[in-house]
Image (cartoon, rainbow, N blue to C red):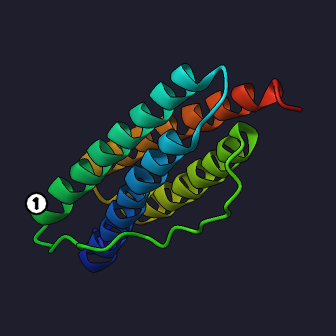
Amino acid sequence: MKDLDLDQTIELLNTVMEFELAGVVRYTHYSLMVTGPNRIPIVDFFKAQATESLLHAQQAGEILTGLGGHPSQKTAPIEESYQHSVPDLLKESLNHEKNALDLYKTLLGVVEDASVYLEEYVRGMIGTEELHTIELQKMLRDFS
C-alpha cells in the first residue's frame, strides 16, 4: 500500500463539497424553471437531484473533517446559460454529472491503494455518477 497524500485528499474532498453544493443550487434552480405538461415529474427529478447533491456534500465533508481538514463554505462556480427548455436543462445536468464523474475519478487516483475505506467511498460515488449520466442520456433520447 502507498501512503495517503492527506493534503491532496483533503483539497479534493473540499472541491467535491463545493461542486456538490453547487449541484444543490443548480438543481434547485432547474426545478423552478421547468414548465409544460411534463413539469411535475421533471421537477420531482431535479428536486431529488438537489437533495442527493446535498447528501454527497455532507458525506465528503464528514470524511474531510475526519481526516483533520476544514470544510469550505464556497460553492463551485455555476454558469447560467439562460436556456431553460427541458432538453437544455437535461443537457446541462449531463455535463454537470460528467464533471462530477471526472472529479471523483481524480480523487480515486489519489486514494487508490492508500486507503481501502476512501477507495470504496470514491468507487461508490463513481458508480452513482455513472448511473446519473446513463439516466440523463436516456431522458434526453426523447428530445433528439
131 w.r.t. 125: above or below: above
Quadrant of the rendering where the C terminus is positioned: top right
Q: Is residue 82 left or right of residue 7?
A: right
41 w.r.t. 140: above or below: above
Please indicate, yes or no, whether residue 116 appears anywhere in the rendered image.
no
Spot occupied by residue 34 in the image (x, y as percentages of width and height) = 59, 37
Quadrant of the rendering where the N terminus is positioned: bottom left
Amino acid at dot 1 = Gly
Q: Residue at x 10, y 71 (%)?
A: 68
**Disc 1 target residue:** 66
Please indicate, yes or no, whether residue 50 appears anywhere in the rendered image.
yes
Q: Is residue 30 left or right of residue 53?
A: right
Q: Residue furthest front?
A: 36
Q: Residue at x 58, y 54 (%)?
A: 96
Quarter of the image holding residue 9?
bottom left
Spot occupied by residue 134 in the image (x, y as percentages of width and height) = 66, 31
112 w.r.t. 89: above or below: below
Q: Residue at x 48, y 50 (%)?
A: 29
Q: Is residue 61 left or right of residue 53?
A: left
Spot occupied by residue 140 in the image (x, y as percentages of width and height) = 76, 32
Q: Is residue 35 left or right of residue 6?
A: right
118 w.r.t. 44: above or below: below
Mark 1 secondary-structure assignment: helix
Viewer-closest of 26 and 109: 26
